[in-house]
Image (tube, grey):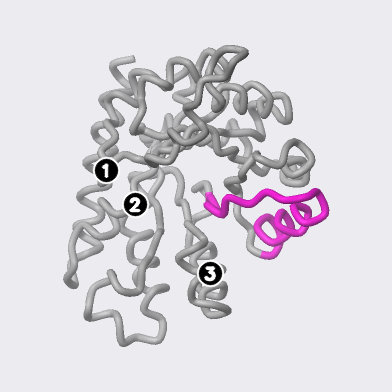
Amino acid sequence: MERTALVNQIKSKQSFLCVGLDTDPNKIPVHLRNREDAIIEFNRKIIEATKAYCIAYKINTAFYEAMGSKGWEIMEQTVKEIPSTHLKIADAKRGDIGNTSDHYARAFFETIPFDAITVAPYMGADSIRPFLAYENKWTIVLGLTSNSGANDFEMQEMKSGGRLYEKVFEIAAKWGNINNLMFVAGATQPKELNRIRKIVPDNFLLVPGVGFQGGSLEEVAKHGMNKDIGLLVNVSRAIIYAKEDEHFAEEAAIIAQQYQVEMNGLMSSR
């Protein structure tokens, strides 16, 4: 999905919501668990219920890889269920020597046709370039994450000035451009978005941490929006596990709509 189409979707829906399909077999409603297609059916219903209110879906591949070959089949089928109008993100956090990354890119951009993938930049440019070589695909570099462990490395002050995560943004921004490169920026430290926007004013940011992790949507919008909105705010558990009975999809739609309404207000007040 090219940048213009993504921006148009955001403006059309007045939403920058990304729904995380981090589906745990032990957390889906009990009435589905004995079905052979339980997870696919759960995901299908969540997608159908929320597609009017979001512009992207993010699949955390670990939840599917843990199930072995069956999980890969479920992930592939889930991607097929996502409308072509929505960005399909593989939250896989890959990144390895060039030849290995080339195969990772083929796996997530060709074998399973995701539109975007999260990558870890620790091994440098040659580990990321194979992903950036694909036209109309997005590479999403881990920049500042929403977990407490971000303090171990990402938030460390460097002797040369600034924080380590800022150096990652500065260097990684040169590997691609605003049409193929996004960054992860956690919602739990929203004021850092001011520093991030000074480095990458025009790139899209994938923002986890709103919802159960406590991030504020209002604060994220205040510090992170740019002229094209430039945000994909991911919400997973607060939407997909909003209700545990046979009405789970209806409740997911209600929560997703609430986020969309709030986003509409934040976009209108810019």
Mark 3, Cα crowd under 10 Å, few <14 / some 14-19 / many 20+, is some
**Quick one: which residue is furthest to the right in this view?**
99
Image quadrant holding the N terminus, namely top right
Residue at coordinates 42% horizontally, 21% vertically from top-left?
192
Residue at coordinates 36% horizontally, 19% vertically from top-left?
191
First in sequence: mark 2 vs mark 3: 3
Amino acid marked by disc 1 = Gly
Q: Which residues are magenta?
A: 88-111
User: How much space separates mark 1 and mark 3, taking CA atoms?
Assistant: 24 Å
Amino acid marked by disc 2 = Ser
Residue 44 % position (x, y): 39, 67
Which residue is the site of mark 3? 65
Considering the numbered disc 2 on the image, is that residue within a helix, a strand or a loop? loop
Which residue is the site of mark 2? 236
User: Which of the pair 9/90 is nearer the observer?
Assistant: 90
The answer to whether residue 94 is magenta is yes
Amino acid marked by disc 3 = Glu
